[in-house]
Amino acid sequence: KSSEERGVFMESEQKARLYRIVKPMAILLLVGIAYAIFVKVTGLAIPCMIRLITGKHCPGCGISRMCMALLHLDFKEAMQQNCLLFFLLPVLLVYGIWKAVTFVKYGDRPLNKVEQAGTLVLFVLMVAFWILRNTERFAFLAPRV
C-alpha cells in the first residue's frame, strides 16, 4: 500500500475508534441529564443498596447529591457529600480524556506500570475511605443526608 492509502486507512480506523467512545459517552450524558431532571422534579434518587442492607455508607454514597451540588456550582456541599470523589474527579477526568485520545490515535494499549500503580492506589484509597467514613471519629466523611 502507498503511504496515502495507509493514511486513509489509519484515519478511518481512528474515526471508528472515536465513534466507539463518543456514542456511549453521549448516551451516558443523556441518561445523566435525564436522571438529574428526574431527581430535581421528584426528589427521588437511586438508593444505595449497601446502605439499605448494612446501614453503612459505601465509598460511593453521596455521589448523586454531589453531582446535583456540582450542577448548582455548590462546591462546599459537593465536597461534603463525597469528598473522595470530589477531589479525585478532576484527576479522573483528565486521565479519562488522555486515555480516550490515546485510544483514538493508537487503539487498545495495556496499562503501563504507572497506571497499574495508580489503580492500586485508587483501590486502597476507596477501601480506606469506606472504612473511615463508617467510624465515629471520621463520621464527618459520611454524606450529609
Image (cartoon, helix red, strand yellow):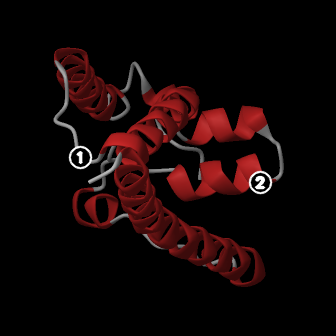
Q: Which amino acid, by three-letter code, is at mark 1?
A: Asp
Is residue 48 left or right of 34 when viewed as pictured?
left
Q: CA distance from mark 2 to mark 1?
A: 33 Å
Residue at 67% from the left image edge and 82% from the top image edge: 38
Of 95 and 73, which appears nearest the observer? 95
Q: Residues within 10 Å of mark 1 (few under 14, many from 20)?
A: few
> Which residue corresponds to mark 1?
108
Q: Quadrant of the N terminus?
A: bottom left
**Residue that sits furthest to the front in the current view:** 2
| Label 1 residue SS | loop
Question: Where in the figure is residue 71, as x and y percent of width and height?
Answer: 77, 54
At horizontal 32% and vertical 41% (from top left) the residue drawn is: 106
> How many other residues sit within 10 Å of disc 2, few (<14), some (14-19) or many (≥20)?
few
Tell whether label 1 touches label 2 (CB within 8 Å).
Answer: no
Q: Is residue 120 left or right of residue 137?
A: left
Residue 46 place in picture, x, y as percent: 47, 73
Decide which of 129, 11 is in the foreground and name it. 11
Vertical position of residue 80 compared to residue 53: above or below: above
| Closer-to-camera residue (27/142) | 27
Amino acid, disc 2 = Leu
Q: At numbered mark 2, what does the secondary structure look like: helix, strand or loop?
A: helix
Q: Which mark is residue 71?
A: 2
